Image (cartoon, helix red, strand yellow):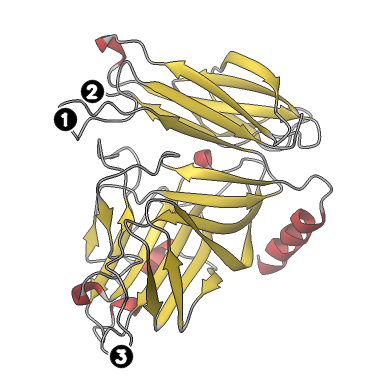
Amino acid sequence: MHSTRSALASFFLCGAAIAQSYTAHPIDNLASGTSQNIPIAGNSASWDEARSHFFFPAAFLPSAGGLLTGIELVANITGTTPYERFEIWADLTQNPGLSTTFANNLTAPVLVYSQTPGSISWTGNAWTPLVFQTPFAYDGQSNLVLEVRKQINRASNPPSSSISHRVLTWPRRTDLPPPIWAYGAYGSGAVDAAVAQSTYSTQILMRLQWLGTPTLTIDSTRDTTGNTARSYFHIGATWTAKTQGSPLDFYAAAIDTVLNPTALPVPVLSGGLWLSLPLLYNSGFLDGSGQATDTFQIPSNPGFVGLRFYLQTATLGAMSAMPNSVDAPIAQY
């Protein structure tokens, strides 16, 4: 397995058509009034140690595979968090979700990022990148697990600010596997816990950075008039889907309400088709920066509430591939 990943990594690093792109989970939007500090940051001594797992379904990852080079997170405020130990591990899994027993989620984890000891400077209300010291080769077929281990020695090296990280606010995405974590005060041993003591039915806003593969992201307007808990993808909202690839490549965009159990191969394209009965809704060429955006207004029709739309694009040219799919669960408001 390790030799296969090394070969894939060499391929992506040496390929002719290299482009930096990202996927956004579960939405490409950083505006959130709610944040969480247990997994990564540290605004309380009660949570200075934590072990956490984050799960990313294969349907929402590049179906052509790619080199995962880092992640991005959104902090609530600007500041620096010192860590006695901070690690990010990456692994592939065929499991459909996360077990609360950490070992059950891992097969051959790879340490991709470490500040042990070290510190991370966060920028408030903006995407802060964590560039992996060891990029991870994703196979295009498996689900992905990211593990974060955090330990802060507040007595000897206190954080300068009470940092936490933005989460998706509303509605709770119970259709997606939630992260899991164990936590405790410094010296509790939670950083090496065997079992998660808590789950939380929301997702920390996160971008995954990719090298050498096209991607697709989705965003939505959010109506906050009279109610700060109004959702993304409500009826009447506008969603924006962004395809990222090589400049001037041709792309085609499709939509569906059903995903295939696995991605189906497509002739002449790398990766596979996740949409079951795709309906083409746009096509054209990526611009000089390798991007194209499509917008769609959700009809103000209560009959759409409860539907879940899936989008996927294909790119032809320097990077002929099927990117990941994205989804839009339609809410009433």
| Depth check, front residue: 118 or 108 | 118
Q: Residue 227 carries which label?
A: 1
> Which badge, 2 or 1, is on the more N-terminal residue?
1
Q: Going 32% across and 15% down the picture, which residue do you hit?
A: 236
Quarter residue 234 falls in: top left
- Who is closer to the viewer here, 263 or 161? 161
Task: Identify the residue under disc 3.
Answer: 156
Q: Which amino acid does label 3 sit on?
A: Ser
Residue 18, horizontal then vertical, whole percent:
76, 48
Q: Residues within 10 Å of mark 3 (few under 14, many from 20)?
A: few
Residue lying at the far right of the rendered structure? 16
Check disc 2: other Cα within 10 Å, few if <14, some if 14-19, many if 20+: many
Q: Residue at x 32, y 30 (%)?
A: 232
Q: Residues within 10 Å of mark 1 (few under 14, many from 20)?
A: few
Give the residue type at disc 1.
Asn
Residue at the bottom extreme of this rendering: 156
Up the image or down, 26 lies above or below 281; here it is below
Instruction: Find residue 39 and report its horizontal and vertical position in percent.
Output: 33, 65
- In which quadrant of the rendered view does residue 123 lie? bottom left
Element marked by disc 3? loop
Task: Where is residue 14? Give x, y as percent.
Answer: 82, 56
> Looking at this view, is 36 or 53 the one in front?
36
Element under disc 2: loop
Q: Which residue is drawn at 40% across and 56% down?
A: 54
Quadrant of the snapshot with the N terminus = bottom right
Q: Which mark is residue 333?
A: 2
Q: Kindly indicate whether the residue at mark 1 contacts the one at mark 2 (C-beta within 8 angstroms).
A: yes
Residue 264, compared with residue 236, is above or below; it is: below
Distance (Cα) linking label 2 and label 3: 47 Å
Q: Classify residue 2 by image quadrant.
A: bottom right
Horizontal placement of 313 versus 303: left or right? right
